[in-house]
Amino acid sequence: MQDPYQPVVDGFLALRNRTIDEKARAREAHPDWHVNQDPRIGLLAKLEMAFGTVGLALMHIQTGLRDPAWWATFTSGVPPARELKWFIYGYDALTKVGFFITEFSIIESTCRVLLRALDPSPCDGARGGFKCVITELLDKRLGFRAEDLALLDLMRLLRNTIHNNGVYLEPHRRDQRISYKHRDYGFEDGKPIDFADWETVLLLSGDALDLSIRLVNHPEIARLPATLTDPFAAQVPRPDPDGPP
């Protein structure tokens, strides 16, 4: 019987490999884009990191947390079966939340940088609500599909729900429903959602990567100056590849 994590691990590592290929194509097509500071290269580089890291984290459940030898090496012994299940459940949940928040933040911050570069006036200088940002950037300026906006709106509501520990809380107490790829995703005020499984997260991640690749390669985005800088990348030191891990 196949390990239920294996298709998810394989899926995320495949997304990582695709992201590496797309980043290489972007660098070849635009050698003047700064490899460490350009937000277009940075979008792909940060998604590559996120996909690879979540794949490794889930592999740790497969080969570490389930293995008595791992527990014997790093702790005082293997916990009882019931406690072990809770350890794995908690690790799984924290990994999923951490990954999704990271992935969404990567895409959101890049959209804000790009909108500000195209036109700093809408959405309070791209500091306003994310729905305003994606409407101005993807719909009005770049002509992306309605399905693309639905994807990011769905991810936005999932992010907001995570902030309330899995319960959807809307300021005006209104329910919301997003139709995406022939499936309805319901968000009922004051109630938890029931579709944040790994299969759904992987599906949305693949689609988010597709959107990100089209965003980076869109003519209006590619024409932005090579001096364009990701504020985060410009201020945070990168790890030395030749230094200690």
Image (cartoon, rainbow, N blue to C red):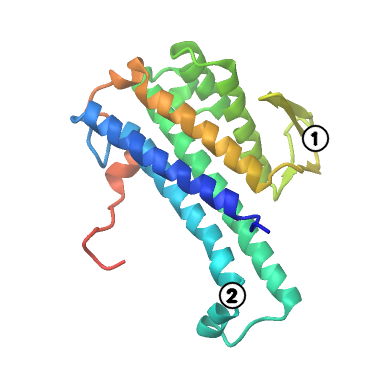
The residue at the point 49 percent across, 11 percent down is 140
Q: Residues within 10 Å of mark 1 (few under 14, many from 20)?
A: some
Which quadrant of the structure image shows residue 195?
A: top right
Asked which quadrant contains residue 245, the reply is bottom left
Residue contact at pointers 1 and 2, CB within 8 angstroms: no
243 versus 192 height, above or below: below
Disc 1 versus disc 2: nearer the observer: 2
Kindly identify the residue that appears in the image at 50 percent across and 16 percent down. Answer: 144
Residue 13: x percent and y percent?
Answer: 47, 48
Q: Left or right of 73: which side holds 154? A: right
Helix or strand or loop: what does disc 2 sit on?
A: loop
Q: Is residue 129 visible?
A: no
Q: Horizontal placement of 89 versus 173: left or right?
A: left
Amino acid type at circle 1 is: Glu
> Which of 203/112 is in front?
203
- Residue extending furthest toward the bottom: 76
Q: Position of residue 139 (x, y in %)?
A: 51, 15
Q: Is residue 19 left or right of residue 108?
A: left
Q: Is residue 210 visible?
A: yes
Q: Which residue is mark 2?
A: 67
User: Which residue is at a point 60% across and 80% down the rendered structure image?
Assistant: 68
Residue situated in front as seen by the camera: 137 or 145? 145
Residue in the image at 48% along x and 19% along y: 138
Is disc 1 placed on a helix, strand or loop? Answer: loop
Residue beneath disc 1: 188
| Mark 2: few/some/many CA within 10 Å (<14, 14-19, 20+) | few
Inspect the image, locate mark 2, and give the three-letter code of the amino acid beneath it: Asp
